[in-house]
Amino acid sequence: MKAVGALRQLGQTQQKLLRSLLAAPQGASVETLCLALGVTHNAVRQHLAALIAAGYVERGTARPTGGRPQARYLLLPAGRELFPRNYGLIATGILEHLYASAGKAAVQSLLATMGQELGSAAASRIDGEDDAAIAARLAEQLDALGYEASTVQRDGETQVEAWNCVFHTLARTHPDVCRFDLAFMEAATGRPIQHMECLLRGGHACRFRLGKPRSGEG
């Protein structure tokens, strides 16, 4: 289940509780949450129990208050990831600014470098004894970046398809941003990559073919 979909699956009270914890990096007590949500202590505890079981919240160390210690409840990374972030809009704005200020060649170089660095970091997670296994691991890494990728059989071999280009809007006016994709995949696999089909050119997906390992690799 995607993060945004998971958040919407929660009830309004649990969503509000998570937002309260998001705004309280040091954690919040049951009493504080009762006031924020306008519900009873028992209701807050029930919601906290469900969110703890789901891995979104944890019970932190109790803090002395001069009276009975009050436990603090903290938002875990998985809970923080439930909240959407419009990275695509921000990235597009940054790249558009770079195109205007630094020029096309500088952006191409930046995208290739970024792709190579991220691909090199992903290389340790891409293994397999045959081309199909390597393609499957590559699709997993692309999917983790938001490409909605999987493998497909074409021309008697396993290729990789992606349905959600992370730079799709920008690529309409600057198709050279695809350099990032290719640089990432080549660095991750140590293989040349052919862009066989492209969403921008009317394809139903972006489809990539893995070439043979470079000399001395694989």
Image (cartoon, rainbow, N blue to C red):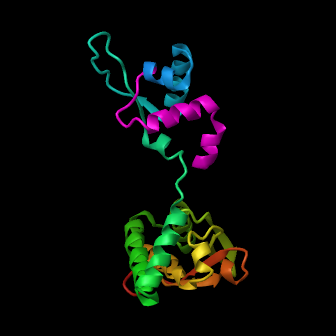
Query: Residue 69 falls in which quadrant of the image?
Result: top left
Residue 168 rendering spot, x and y as whole percentages: 61, 73
Compared with 130, 74 (above or below) is: above
In the image, the segment drawn in magenta is 1-30
Residue 65 rendering spot, x and y as whole percentages: 29, 16
Q: Is residue 162 one of those drawn in magenta? A: no
Asked if residue 218 can be seen in this view, the reply is no
Compared with 176, 75 (above or below) is: above
Residue 128 rendering spot, x and y as whole percentages: 48, 67
Q: Is residue 135 left or right of residue 62?
A: right
Q: Main secondary structure of the magenta part?
A: helix
Residue 213 rendering spot, x and y as whole percentages: 46, 82
Asked if residue 36 can be seen in this view, the reply is yes
Residue at 45% from the left image edge and 34% from the top image edge:
21
Q: Which residue occupies the foreground of this view, 150 or 102?
A: 102
Q: Which residue occupies the foreground of this view, 186 or 50?
A: 50
Q: Is residue 144 left or right of residue 154?
A: left
Residue at 48% from the left image edge and 33% from the top image edge:
20
Q: Is residue 4 one of those drawn in magenta? A: yes
